[in-house]
Image: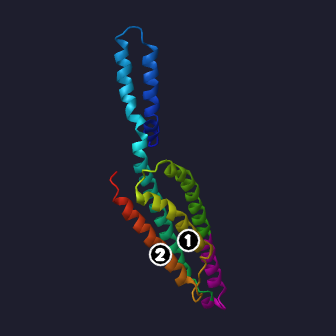
Amino acid sequence: MLQLTPALAGLECVLKMLAVFGALANVKQPGDILNVAQKAAELAGCLNFAIKIPCMMVDILKLIIKYLKCIIDAIESILRFQVGINFGAAQGNPVLLASLNCAQNNANASTAQLKEALAVVQPLLAVIKPIGALAPSLPGPVGDALKIMPDALAAIGQVLDGGSVSAGVPGGEDLAAKLDEVKGVLKQIDEALDLIPC
């Protein structure tokens, strides 16, 4: 039921177009042309999609940014969790070693899920990039975001690929610094997109 309203809203313009065709098919006398004109006027609101493209692009990019921020937060949580896994403390204690192995396996499984979650962004960017190329009137921050997003995705992917960190293992600080840098870039893009009146 929750999905029904957005689905029907997506059909609104199609239904208005069918109404115009229906009115045209029913023209039998001169007065019926007024009905066609009325239905055509209702359809006209659907034909200004070119005006709506910049705002649509802004909304999609802001959604991607929020999604990436959630992934970064999840990665940071996993990294903090992994830092607490100290296999050196389990020497001579098979029960603790089994628990730490289980914790590490859970962290690895979570990282794999985040990789899958990150993979859905690239095809979405591939779809909206040509739309951006077709609309030269897009505000500057939208074009900037489309250029920066692949780099942000690549950086997050690198962190996920090298994200296994245990206590005493160097590299954890580098991963955290890279994530902070990406978060800073995403924040700047988000703030620039907020300035676009939509």
Element type where label 2 sits in the image: helix
Q: How is the image coloured?
A: rainbow
Q: Which residues are magenta?
A: 88-108
x, y percentage for residue 75? 53, 72
Horizontal side of 126 relative to 70 (left or right) equals right
Can residue 184 be seen in this snapshot? yes
Q: CA distance from mark 1 to mark 2?
A: 9 Å
| Residue at 40% across, 55% down | 139
Please tell me which residue lies in front, 122 or 171: 122
Asked if the stretch drawn in magenta spans residue 140, the answer is no
* Residue appearing at x 45%, y 19% in the figure: 22
Residue density around tag 2, few if under 14, some if 14–19, many if 20 or more, within 10 Å:
some
Residue 5 left/right relative to 124: left
Q: Secondary structure at mark 1?
A: helix
| Residue 170 percent location from the top left of the image | 58, 87
Amino acid identity at mark 1: Ala
Quarter of the rendering containing residue 20: top left
Query: On the image, numbered disc 2 is attached to which residue?
Result: 181
Foreground residue among 25 and 171 = 25
31 left or right of 75 in image: left
User: Which image quarter holds the N terminus?
Assistant: top left
In magenta stretch: residue 101: yes
Residue assigned mark 1: 155
